[in-house]
């Protein structure tokens, strides 16, 4: 059965919004290897509507990072949305209606992991509905001060640390699973 795995670039103060404005000074080969391994293990990618709109506009037109563009453009993609009626990005399916049932079925169907990068609202919903299997936080040693935080006005969700690594840039790579005990 596939696992839904979410990964975030996150600041010390919990901001996940617009990492393109603060994240890149911390990028190095260690982080690249982690991100690459996630892409390699992906049987599909899952995202919310906002991230879908951003990524489909960017990855289908960019001249940068052609390896990532080709991988994402060819990959199976699923969008959780109550407002998006169709997806134009190749190999993309919209999941609406009974999203929880749709994702449970998808987890049984997909070979490999179902990877997510971003989509904070969707991740909060996945946690609340017991559908998120792993949460990876790449905690950057910077206080951003403002922007959307990963956990805003959420109920308590106990998590268990299953992996930790410190990169030379000071970024902490932390892996959590829901603590259902």
Image (cartoon, rainbow, N blue to C red):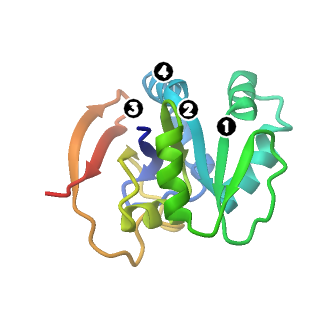
> Where the N terminus falls, by quadrant?
top left
Q: Please tell me whether residue 137 is drawn above or below residue 42 in the rendered image.
A: below
Q: Please tell me whether residue 88 is drawn above or below residue 158 in the rendered image.
A: above
Residue beneath label 4, please? 29
How far is mark 3 from mark 2, CA to CA? 30 Å
Mark 2 or mark 1, which is nearer the start of the sequence? 2
> Where the C terminus falls, by quadrant?
bottom left
How far is mark 2 from mark 4, CA to CA? 23 Å
Observer-side mark, 1 or 3, equals 1
Q: Are marks 1 and 2 in contact (CB under 8 Å)?
A: yes
Mark 4 or mark 3, which is nearer the start of the sequence? 4
How far is mark 1 from mark 2, CA to CA? 7 Å
Comparing 61 with 148, the one in front is: 61
| 76 relative to 148 in the view: left or right | right
Residue beneath label 1, please? 76
Residue appearing at x 61%, y 55% in the figure: 18
Mark 4 or mark 2, which is nearer the start of the sequence? 4
Callout 1: 10 Å neighbours few (<14), some, many (20+)? some
Mark 4 or mark 1, which is nearer the start of the sequence? 4
| Local secondary structure at mark 3 | loop
> Within the image, what quadrant is residue 126 found in?
bottom left
Residue beneath label 2, please? 43
| 137 relative to 28 in the view: left or right | left
Residue beneath label 3, please? 169
> Taking the image as drawn, is residue 120 in sight?
no
Q: Are marks 1 and 3 in contact (CB under 8 Å)?
A: no
Observer-side mark, 1 or 4, equals 1
Q: Are marks 2 and 4 in contact (CB under 8 Å)?
A: no
Mark 3 or mark 1, which is nearer the start of the sequence? 1
Q: Are marks 1 and 4 in contact (CB under 8 Å)?
A: no
Q: Are marks 3 and 4 in contact (CB under 8 Å)?
A: no
Mark 2 or mark 3, which is nearer the start of the sequence? 2
């Amino acid at each position: 059965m596939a696992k839904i795995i979410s990964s975030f670039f996150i600041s010390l103060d919990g901001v996940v919004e617009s990492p393109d404005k603060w994240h890149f000074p911390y990028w190095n080969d260690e982080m690249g290897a982690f991100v690459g391994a996630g892409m390699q293990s992906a049987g599909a990618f899952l995202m919310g509507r906002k991230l879908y709109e951003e990524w489909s506009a960017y990855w289908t037109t960019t001249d940068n990072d052609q390896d990532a563009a080709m991988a994402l453009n060819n990959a199976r993609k699923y969008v959780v949305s109550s407002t998006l009626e169709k997806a134009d990005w190749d190999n993309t399916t919209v999941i609406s209606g009974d999203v929880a049932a749709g994702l449970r079925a998808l987890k049984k169907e997909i070979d490999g992991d179902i990877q997510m990068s971003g989509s904070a609202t969707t991740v909060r919903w996945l946690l609340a509905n017991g559908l998120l299997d792993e949460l990876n936080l790449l905690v950057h040693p910077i206080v951003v001060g403002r922007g959307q935080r990963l956990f805003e006005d959420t109920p308590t969700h106990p998590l268990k640390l299953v992996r930790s690594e410190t990169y030379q840039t000071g970024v902490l790579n932390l892996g959590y699973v829901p603590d259902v005990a």
